[in-house]
Image (cartoon, helix red, strand yellow):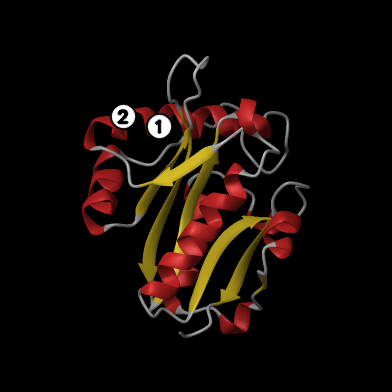
Amino acid sequence: MDIVIRPPLLSEIPRLGEIERDGDRRYRGYAGVPDGFDDAAAPEQLHEALVDGRLWVAETVVGASAPGPDLVGFALAEIVDGNVHLEQVSVVRSCHGRGVGRRLVETVCAWAQEQAMPAVTLCTFSDVEWNRPLYEHLGFHVLPEERWTPGLRAVFDSDARLGLDLERRVVMHRAIPTR
């Protein structure tokens, strides 16, 4: 499957909530996420990120026999205490395991380097096979709590308001080399 990573069109913003919810269905039955969890990034947050250049989508490449391009994932970045924070990466379940998420993460890391940011951070589940191990494979490592910035602490704590089990969550960090 060929994928293009690009900034979204304004008209595509409403579709991103559907992508996020579809990707999150993978967590059904996982104890770290409450039953009925249905949170998605707010359209206003996505619009602001689009305007600021902090939002990317993954789109299938159309071949001669393909029905047309389709959005299959997205990545949303924030700036938290002078670092890029990977707020959300979502991929539709039909494309899991095909490198779409990896491509989105690498796009965010490349953007961080272009912005001369020293690191990319994220919060994820430590005990889910497709979370922490994937990020470790991509060069992230668990950031000890004593190294969290106040903004990063606030992001982590906000996961509790969503009902996520903080005992299963970690903050991860990837240093970004300067050019």
- Find residue 17 and report its horizontal and vertical position in percent: 40, 32
Residue at screen point 37% across, 62% down? 78
Q: Secondary structure at mark 1?
A: helix
Residue 23 in which image quadrant: top right
Q: Is residue 128 above or below residue 84?
A: above
Q: Mark 1 — residue?
A: 17
Q: Give how far across and how far down residue 46 sits, in percent.
A: 30, 45
53 relative to 100, above or below: below
158 with respect to 49 (left or right): right
Front residue of 158 and 105: 105
Instruction: Say which quadrant the N terminus sits in.
Output: top right
- Does residue 38 appear in the picture of this structure? no
Residue at coordinates 64% horizontally, 75% vertically from top-left?
143
Which of the labelled discs sits on residue 3, or is there none?
Answer: none
Q: Name the amino acid type tagged 1.
A: Gly
At mark 2, the secondary structure is helix
| Circle 2: residue type | Pro
User: How crowded is the residue under tag 2: few (<14 C-alpha within 10 Å), some, or many (20+)?
Assistant: few
Is 8 positioned to the left or the right of 155 in the image?
left
User: Residue shown at 50%/66% (left/top)?
Assistant: 109
Q: Which residue is mark 2?
A: 14
Q: Give the total of numbered labels.
A: 2
Q: Quadrant of residue 18?
A: top left
Q: CA distance from mark 1 to mark 2?
A: 6 Å
Q: Position of residue 106 (x, y in %)?
A: 54, 59
- Mark 1, other Cα within 10 Å: few <14 / some 14–19 / many ≥20: many
Residue 124 lies in quadrant: bottom right
Tell me what residue is drawn at x 30 percent, y 31 percent: 12
